[in-house]
Amino acid sequence: MVSEQMSNLNIPLLSVRNLMKRYGEGCSECASADMLSDQSNRCSTCGSVWACRDVSFDLYEGEILGIVGESGSGKSSLVKCLYFDDAVQSGSATITSYEEGHVNIFAESAQQKRYIRNYLMGMVYQNPWMGLKMSFSSGGNIAEKLIASGTYHVESIRSRAAELLDHVEIPLARMDELPKNFSGGMQQRVQISKALANNPPILLLDEVTTGLDLSVQAKVLDLIRKLQRELNVAMIVVSHDLSVIRMLADRTFVMRNGQVVEQGLTDQILEDPMHPYTQQLVHSLL
């Protein structure tokens, strides 16, 4: 039994290989990503941008993986591709709980991608207006996610919504209130509760503390750590803020100009960075 559990720990929950994402039509000067230099991911001829260039990584059950890099490094594009907000040029991603990890989810039909979004992944955007419908109540936003996955019983939906909002410390008296009336920190917590509605094994968080006051940031980060411990959900946390990555991530990889330039245990990356760009990021924090 113990050996079986150890074996499962060595199997990635999510495995991404050679992910390529370009914005723009491309031209003869940028037909493939390796035609651009390491110093820029933008084509000087047509302006197209290779946001992700041959990105590969694994995510394991119950861990938090950090992605760090400056604005334009490709980190947000990566999670948007994983959540099917943006289409990839090429590459593969497999999830062990989907078709036993044998199917490239990027190549699946629109219907199957909706299934994956509804059951296997949750997404929390930097801007709550992207993740929430502000004309729906907080409970209504969660209901939308539950209905999309086939839950139609009103009592069950309200009970689950109340449970989730309570979990993220939103007063139940405000369950029927519109989230546009909430503070930024409360909107993020409603987003998190919506993303967790169907108990997905993977949660994607894109710059969720950006623009929040420091005290509110701390509460949101504490909530994320609490949820990870209690629910054992695997998370990918995107941030330009190394202090957020230090607090949350077990492992981290650093992106620059669409490429992964360094990866490893978070403590190792932050205490002894090897790549000059990572060194620059770490020194800017000190």
Image (cartoon, rainbow, N blue to C red):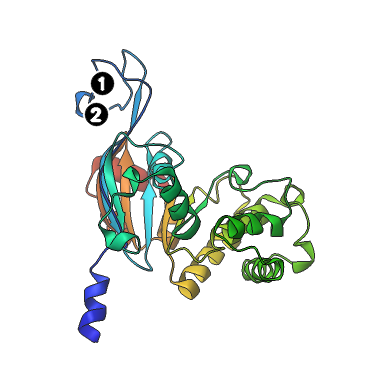
Residue at figure coordinates x 27%, y 28% from the top left:
39
Query: For the residue marked with disc 1, what is the amino acid?
Result: Cys
Which residue is labeled 2 in the image?
Answer: 33
Label placed on residue 30: 1
Pinpoint residue 189: horizontal percent, then vertical percent. Answer: 62, 58
Viewer-closest of 44 and 30: 30
Neighbour class for label 1 at 10 Å: few (<14), some, many (≥20)?
many
Q: Does the residue at mark 1 contact the one at mark 2 (Cβ under 8 Å)?
A: yes
Residue at figure coordinates x 34%, y 37% from the top left:
88
Query: For the residue marked with disc 2, what is the amino acid?
Result: Ala
Pinpoint residue 76: horizontal percent, then vertical percent. Answer: 43, 42
Viewer-closest of 168 and 87: 87
Residue at figure coordinates x 28%, y 63% from the top left:
100
Secondary structure under tag 1 reads: loop
Pinpoint residue 144: horizontal percent, then vertical percent. Answer: 63, 54
Viewer-closest of 86 and 227: 86
